[in-house]
Image (spheres, rainbow, N blue to C red):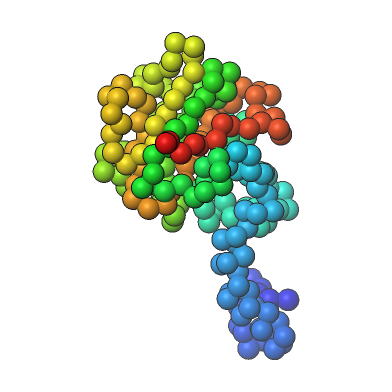
Amino acid sequence: MAGIDVQNGFDPARIDPASRAGLLRALRDGPSVVENGFLPYTTVRNGWGSFSPIGTYGDQFLARAFIAYSGIGANVPEEEAYFRAYTDGQNRLLAGEKSYTLHFDRDQLPKTTALWSINVYDNELFLAKTEAGRASVRSNNGTLKLGPDGSLDIVLQKSPPRDPHANWLPTPAGNFNLVLRVFAPISGSLGPRHAWPPVRESR
């Protein structure tokens, strides 16, 4: 027992030495346990990881703690689906010194009754600071240009692409990660075997 009660609060002198040692160990080890708590709950395909359970956790306290650590909170899957990528399709960490392309065939684009977005984050899980002053693209602001076949290419790099009409997602210096959010996803469009296309390094 931790020795906490509503009348007297917490007094470490009132608990036995073994319990006190356990609490001290929890204080020491707890942050790293939470920080690495994504592994048991994450499925990765093509470099994109999905986390489950999310939004509602039941008795999965580590899952709840990791979401609070990494993003404060999360919506339920019916309202918003989240996917994070730290690596490209070759399992290499995403780096601002490189250029990448993310290609969606027409039938691979997120299916939603609202919108979808891709944001760039730094290694501390904050929105990345880029030279362009932005770190996201989204589907509902009229700036993304589809190809003649309905496909979509997004260029990810620090500097503007040579083609001024390209769909450009600016990246920061150093390593970064991506979060793809699908708001109000169409029911059944994100099944357990769903896979987004990989981020590919441009040659």
Q: Examine the rendered structure and indicate whether residue 56 appears above or below residue 188.
A: below
Residue 171: horizontal and vertical position, in percent? 36, 42
Vertical order, 151 against 19 (above or below): above
Which residue is at the far front? 203
State whether residue 75 appears in this view: no
Q: Is residue 23 visible?
A: yes
Question: In which quadrant of the rendered image does the C terminus lie?
Answer: top left
Image quadrant of residue 30?
bottom right
Viewer-side residue, 148 vs 67 = 148
Q: Which residue sits at x=66%, y=31%?
A: 194
The picture places residue 177, in percent across and down from the top left corner, at 47, 46
Give me the residue at 58% from left, 32% from top. Answer: 196
Most foreground residue, 22 or 139: 139
Q: Is residue 62 above or below residue 167?
A: below
Residue at the image position 39 percent from the left and 32 percent from the top? 155
Residue at image point 55% right, 35% down: 198
